[in-house]
């Protein structure tokens, strides 16, 4: 045994001597991988990512021994430069979005628009620290090339043996890391819904490789599986004929004009919220009291965030499983509320003060059926908040455009997309500086607790207050205008602000008597876990009119996919391909499917990757059949929708119907 140990250490020592340059490359690569995690999410020497941070560069580096003409150094240098660039991009991107970059973003840079400009503003010198790796490597190589014994060693080195030896080392270390993971980890890697968790389990390199595969997947998927997807599509719609609704809301808004107001990152959390007795969203709260307010309404977004919301609301289809519809599948044929209203004589338009290239809206909006798109070119960019024109200026400049549209059209439908409340919610001099501290006045002293000051949640609250104020001024202008008397406004939050769970947990567990956060052992501690956070992602959905007050609160659980069918019944429309439901028909029997396979009902929230759930009431016992049926429904909706998107099945179905008529 002693001899074996001695031979092992002798072989290891000999390997290092004969592969000094490679060892330096491996060390520098690992340091880069550790630094990117530390500079983004604060993780340093976590076991799982560290294993892959060591092994994956070794596996890639092993290929250097197959390169002829002694180009090993050049190959390893290129690997280090690529890794450094990946780390720099992710470091900057994380600073802005609190997430890691995707190749889909890089391949669609022209769609990034002003977000790209905002990213540039986040660039700091420390984010380029990864460039030290290739620079140090160049210096090391220069030093070693001057050393005579290294030149001799290179001549003696057996490259094929070194390749096998190095590859084995890399694979062995990878195997150790792989065997220590569980099925949940691999589900997260495959789905990649939470990028931070993927990086914290697999490291930055595996994350980026997996992301590249997911970016290419839409193109790959479109080449295969058409016949299977078409059969599923035909079978589903043959068995599930979409019936027209017939309830108290049928045709109540027939021939009305309709304006959607897409409220960036506005969530239900803001309704009735007060901080130090200051209402944060008084205007949205008032509209919810005056209109038809859906209090359990959930967006169903994937990687496309705001664009996914636009797509799902317009079509009653789910977001794409891979890529984003707006960027990867914009040239498909979709049923949409815009097209249906156009067929009824409506003029359709959209308004957004960002560049038309953002999320490829210049191509996707016509595909959805909008006739005109009023983008940043239609506005005077006179006041900047966040990513572009302030909501106040945007709304103010939109009023005369809207009045002109009404004066020139008998009926119209439009979508107004706000911008100011977009992440990262940086404070702005135009914001009302709400006091986010908490003050206790004792007899002897006054104590100020930070509370929400200098937190992401505090920044979000302040930003949302500004967005609400801008919306309130717009509604005042609508009320005072001689127009919009036959118009309904549909206001919806597009998605949650994507804040960390601990931001909300600290908020709900703040002890106002001590200024500290309750510990788990405290009786007053609120367990704000994954399920609480998912349920907290609901956003307002409000139907409002200047001339009618409905004063109705609807508490059925519904998703963005249900908006089109619900409104279609009110407007006298019909979409035979809708995968959502008229909420007033299905009521409490609705199942809200999410793109990651999770689902929500009035009884339960189901966590697909963990295959576990939490009941809404907290103590209700549900049968296995109930969960299985809900899961089967969720999988079917995702599968049918993705087939429609990937393989353009609506167009195929339309062509078949045309041929049959002929």
Image (cartoon, rainbow, N blue to C red):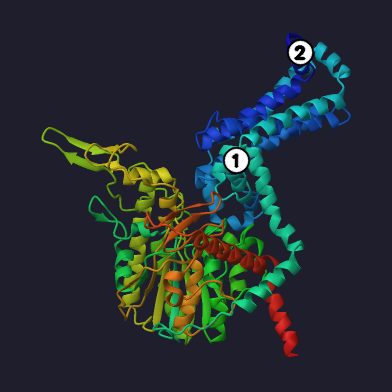
Residue linked to disc 1: 182
Residue sitting at x 74%, y 14%? 13
Query: Which residue is at the front of the view, 64 or 375?
Result: 64
Asked if one can make out residue 385 in the rendered structure from this viewpoint, the answer is no
Q: Secondary structure at mark 2?
A: helix
What x and y, as percent, mark residue 322?
64, 57
Q: Is residue 593 above or below residue 31?
A: below
- Lateral position of residue 241 relative to residue 499, left or right: right
Q: Is residue 94 above or below residue 347?
A: above
- Quarter of the N terminus within the rendering: top right
What x and y, as percent, mark residue 65?
83, 28
What x and y, as percent, mark residue 352?
50, 66
Residue linked to disc 2: 4
What x and y, as percent, mark residue 159?
86, 25
Q: Find the residue positioned furthest to the left.
A: 443
Structural distance between the alpha carbons of marks 1 and 2: 33 Å
Q: Secondary structure at mark 1?
A: loop
């Amino acid at each position: 045994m002693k001899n074996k140990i001695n031979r092992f250490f002798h072989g290891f020592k000999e390997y290092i001597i004969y592969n000094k340059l490679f060892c330096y490359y491996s060390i520098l690569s690992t340091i880069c991988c550790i630094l990117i995690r530390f500079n983004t999410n604060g993780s340093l020497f976590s076991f799982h990512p560290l294993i892959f941070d060591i092994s994956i560069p070794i596996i890639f580096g092993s290929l250097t021994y197959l390169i002829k003409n002694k180009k090993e150094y050049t190959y390893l240098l290129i690997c280090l430069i690529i890794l450094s660039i990946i780390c720099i991009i992710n470091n900057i991107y994380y600073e802005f979005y609190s997430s890691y970059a995707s190749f889909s973003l890089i391949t669609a840079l022209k769609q990034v628009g002003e977000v790209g400009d905002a990213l540039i503003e986040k660039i700091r010198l420390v984010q380029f620290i990864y460039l030290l790796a290739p620079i140090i490597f160049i210096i090391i190589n220069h030093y070693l090339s001057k050393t005579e014994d290294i030149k001799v060693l290179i001549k003696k080195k057996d490259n094929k043996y070194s390749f096998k030896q190095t590859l084995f080392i890399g694979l062995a270390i990878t195997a150790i890391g792989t065997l220590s993971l569980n099925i949940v980890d691999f589900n997260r890697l495959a789905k990649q819904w939470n990028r931070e968790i993927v990086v914290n389990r697999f490291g930055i390199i595996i994350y980026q490789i997996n992301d590249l595969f997911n970016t290419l997947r839409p193109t790959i998927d479109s080449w295969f599986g058409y016949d299977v997807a078409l059969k599923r599509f035909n079978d589903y719609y043959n068995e599930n004929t979409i019936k027209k609704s017939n309830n108290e809301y049928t045709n109540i808004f027939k021939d009305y004009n309709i304006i959607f107001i897409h409220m960036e990152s506005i969530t239900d959390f803001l309704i009735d919220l007060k901080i130090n007795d200051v209402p944060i969203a008084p205007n949205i709260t008032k509209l919810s009291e005056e209109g038809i307010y859906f209090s359990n309404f959930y967006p169903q977004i994937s990687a496309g965030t705001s664009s996914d919301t636009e797509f799902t609301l317009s079509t009653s289809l789910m977001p794409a499983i891979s890529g984003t519809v707006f960027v990867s599948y914009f040239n498909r044929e979709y049923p949409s509320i815009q097209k249906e209203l156009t067929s009824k004589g409506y003029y359709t338009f959209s308004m957004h003060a960002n560049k038309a290239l953002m999320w490829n809206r210049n191509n996707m909006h016509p595909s959805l059926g909008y006739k005109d798109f009023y983008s940043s070119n239609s506005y005077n960019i006179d006041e900047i908040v966040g990513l572009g024109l302030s909501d106040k200026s945007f709304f103010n400049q939109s009023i005369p455009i809207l009045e002109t549209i009404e004066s020139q059209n008998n009926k119209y439908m439009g979508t107004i997309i706000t911008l100011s409340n977009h992440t990262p919610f940086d404070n702005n001099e135009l914001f009302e500086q709400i006091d986010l501290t908490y003050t206790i006045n004792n007899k002897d002293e006054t104590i100020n607790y930070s509370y929400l000051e200098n937190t992401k949640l505090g920044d979000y609250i302040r930003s949302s207050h500004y967005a609400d104020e801008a919306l309130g001024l717009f509604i005042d202008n609508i009320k005072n205008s001689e127009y919009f008397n036959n118009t309904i406004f549909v206001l919806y939050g597009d998605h949650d602000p994507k804040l960390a769970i601990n931001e909300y947990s600290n908020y709900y567990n703040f002890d106002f008597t001590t200024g500290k956060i309750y510990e788990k052992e405290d009786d007053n501690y609120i367990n704000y876990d994954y399920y609480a956070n998912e349920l907290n992602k609901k956003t307002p959905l409000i139907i409002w009119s200047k001339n009618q007050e409905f004063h109705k609160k609807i508490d059925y659980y519904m998703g963005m996919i249900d908006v089109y069918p619900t409104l279609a019944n009110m407007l006298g429309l019909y979409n035979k391909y809708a995968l959502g439901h008229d909420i007033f028909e299905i009521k409490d029997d609705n199942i809200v499917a999410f793109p990651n396979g999770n689902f929500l009902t009035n009884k339960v929230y189901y966590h697909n990757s963990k295959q576990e759930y939490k009941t809404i009431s907290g103590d209700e016992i549900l049968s296995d059949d109930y969960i299985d049926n809900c899961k089967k429904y969720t999988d079917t909706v995702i599968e049918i929708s993705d087939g429609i998107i990937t393989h353009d099945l609506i167009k195929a179905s339309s062509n078949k119907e045309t041929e049959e008529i002929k």
